[in-house]
């Protein structure tokens, strides 16, 4: 991983083998920010797991075996109540037949490269808290 900072913007390049959620959470700890908007991401990933939440607040997961293009990535980063960095990401992947797959991104390992932009929210206080009877971890503001 390499990154550069310009004002409140962080641009990061992730390399083969790096998992996107873990890498962005580690970046928050290394650089020292608590909140960010993840505005874009592109690249090529493998073993990408995405899905959706149903009306009963339960997630359903689908895995794209092998490689796929990361066409879009967006979301945010906040801290859990215990201070741990938490990323909430949505993505669109395209398989090698260019069929799109989109939804909540549970995990994706960089296969070739991922280039991601984050806008650090320097004055925001955002916390992720579990919702009762739900797999969702809600965003709250203080």
Image (tube, helix red, strand yellow):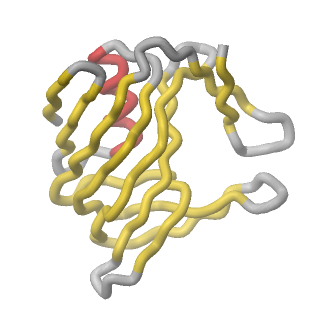
Q: How many marks?
A: 0
Task: From this view, report whether residue 23 is shown above or below residue 65.
Answer: above
**Which is more toward the observer, 106 or 10?**
10
**Which is more toward the observer, 71 or 87?**
71
**Which is more toward the observer, 68 or 102?**
102
| Quadrant of the drawing holding the N terminus | top left
106 with respect to 33 (left or right):
right
The location of residue 32, given as percent across then percent down, is: 34, 13
69 with respect to 33 (left or right):
left
Task: From this view, report whether residue 34 is shown above or below residue 93.
Answer: above
What residue is rendered at 18% in x and 23% in y? 6
| Quadrant of the drawing holding the C terminus | top right
The location of residue 121, given as percent across then percent down, is: 43, 21
The location of residue 33, given as percent across then percent down, is: 38, 16
Task: From this view, report whether residue 132 is shown above or below residue 91.
Answer: above
What residue is rendered at 65% in x and 63% in y? 60
- The residue furthest bottom is 97
What residue is rendered at 23% in x and 58% in y? 43
User: Which picture quadrant has residue 91?
Assistant: bottom left
What residue is rendered at 54% in x and 62% in y? 103
The location of residue 75, given as percent across then percent down, is: 48, 43
């Amino acid at each position: 991983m390499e990154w550069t900072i310009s004002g409140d913007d962080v641009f990061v390049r992730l390399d083969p083998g790096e998992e996107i959620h873990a890498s962005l959470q580690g970046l928050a700890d290394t650089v020292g920010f608590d909140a960010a908007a993840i505005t874009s991401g592109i690249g090529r990933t493998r073993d990408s797991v995405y899905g959706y939440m149903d009306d009963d607040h339960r997630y359903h997961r689908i895995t794209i075996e092998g490689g796929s293009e990361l066409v879009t990535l967006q979301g945010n980063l906040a801290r859990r109540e215990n201070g741990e960095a938490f990323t909430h990401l949505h993505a669109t992947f395209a398989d090698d037949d260019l069929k799109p797959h989109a939804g909540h991104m549970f995990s994706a390992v960089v296969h070739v490269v991922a280039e991601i932009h984050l806008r650090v929210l320097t004055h925001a206080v955002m916390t992720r808290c579990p919702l009762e009877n739900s797999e969702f971890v809600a965003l709250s503001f203080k």
